[in-house]
């Protein structure tokens, strides 16, 4: 493979978009996703994006005649992890449970955290920018929920750590899509 200086990525800026419908296709304009995609707002600079994997171990099966006959791989469960840093209803529903509710408490709005939270399910789209170029990740079906405890540090912005478990979608043979690097804006004069 030849060296391609335009195919490297410095993930300087990124945006998380969520659609409440599973199977939502890639936005027509990946640089400005339109309805039903909504921007999840500010997210952590410390740990902006990560995909973790559990499972996927390979085991070699054999017979008496051939000790290394076949490999089998256990199912993998992958999750996207990030921290929401806007303390608003949208973030509360992702972290505390989609079945929570806004209520009035003495003239102030409060979010009532459900005793048995339900995860937020839909599609996730992540745009990663590197100057005038970028790439995206598209997850047609995810389930978003709390990933870790809330911790306040007076020297950092407080966040709500969430994980989006990547789920399969009936009739689809993939769970995610990642683009090649592309220009984020058309070249001047084009």
Image (cartoon, rainbow, N blue to C red):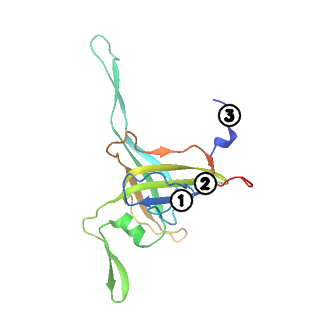
Q: Position of residue 124 (x, y in %)?
A: 44, 55
Neighbourhood count class around disc 1 (C-alpha, 10 Å): few under 14, some 14–19, many 20 upward? some
Nearer to the camera, 116 or 135:
135
Judge left or right: residue 110 versus residue 39: left
Circle 3/circle 2 CB separation < 8 Å? no
Q: Secondary structure at mark 1?
A: strand
Which residue reaches farthest front? 190
Residue 187, percent across and down? Answer: 71, 52
Which residue is rendered at x = 43% and y = 66% of the image? Answer: 151
Which residue is at the front of the view, 87 or 25?
A: 25
Q: Which mark is residue 3?
A: 3
SS at badge 2: strand
Q: Earlier in the sequence, mark 3 or mark 1?
A: 3
- Packing grade of label 2 (10 A; few <14, some 14-19, many >=20) is many
Q: Are marks 1 and 2 in contact (CB under 8 Å)?
A: yes
Pick out the residue farthest to the left: 116
Q: Earlier in the sequence, mark 3 or mark 2?
A: 3
**Residue 133 location, x and y as percent?**
64, 50
Residue reaching furthest to the top: 65
- On the rendered image, what quadrant is the N terminus found in? top right
Tag 2 or tag 1, which sits nearer the N-term?
1
Helix, strand or loop at label 3? It is loop
The label shown at residue 122 is none
Q: Quadrant of residue 129?
A: bottom right
> Which residue is tagged 1?
15
Question: Alpha carbon of mark 3 to alpha carbon of mark 2: how far?
Answer: 21 Å
Circle 2 sits on which residue?
129
In this view, 54 is above or below 147: above
Residue 181, how many percent across, how many down? Answer: 60, 45
Q: Is residue 155 above or below residue 119?
A: below
């Amino acid at each position: 493979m030849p060296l391609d200086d335009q195919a490297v990525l410095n993930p300087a800026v990124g945006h998380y978009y969520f659609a409440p419908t599973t199977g939502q296709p890639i936005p027509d304009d990946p640089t400005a996703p339109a309805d039903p995609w909504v921007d999840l707002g500010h997210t952590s600079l410390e740990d902006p994006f990560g995909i973790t994997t559990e499972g996927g171990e390979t085991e070699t099966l054999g017979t008496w005649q051939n000790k290394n006959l076949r490999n089998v791989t256990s199912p993998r469960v992958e999750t996207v992890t990030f921290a929401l840093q806007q303390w608003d209803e949208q973030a509360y529903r992702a972290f505390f449970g989609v079945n929570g509710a806004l209520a009035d408490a003495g003239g102030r709005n409060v979010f009532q955290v459900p005793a048995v939270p339900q995860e937020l399910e839909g599609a996730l789209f992540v745009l990663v920018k590197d100057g005038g170029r970028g790439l995206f990740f598209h997850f047609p079906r995810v389930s978003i929920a709390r990933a870790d405890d809330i911790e306040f540090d007076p020297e950092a912005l407080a966040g709500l750590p969430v994980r989006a478990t990547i789920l399969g979608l009936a009739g689809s043979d993939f769970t995610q899509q990642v683009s090649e690097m592309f220009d984020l804006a058309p070249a001047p004069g084009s």
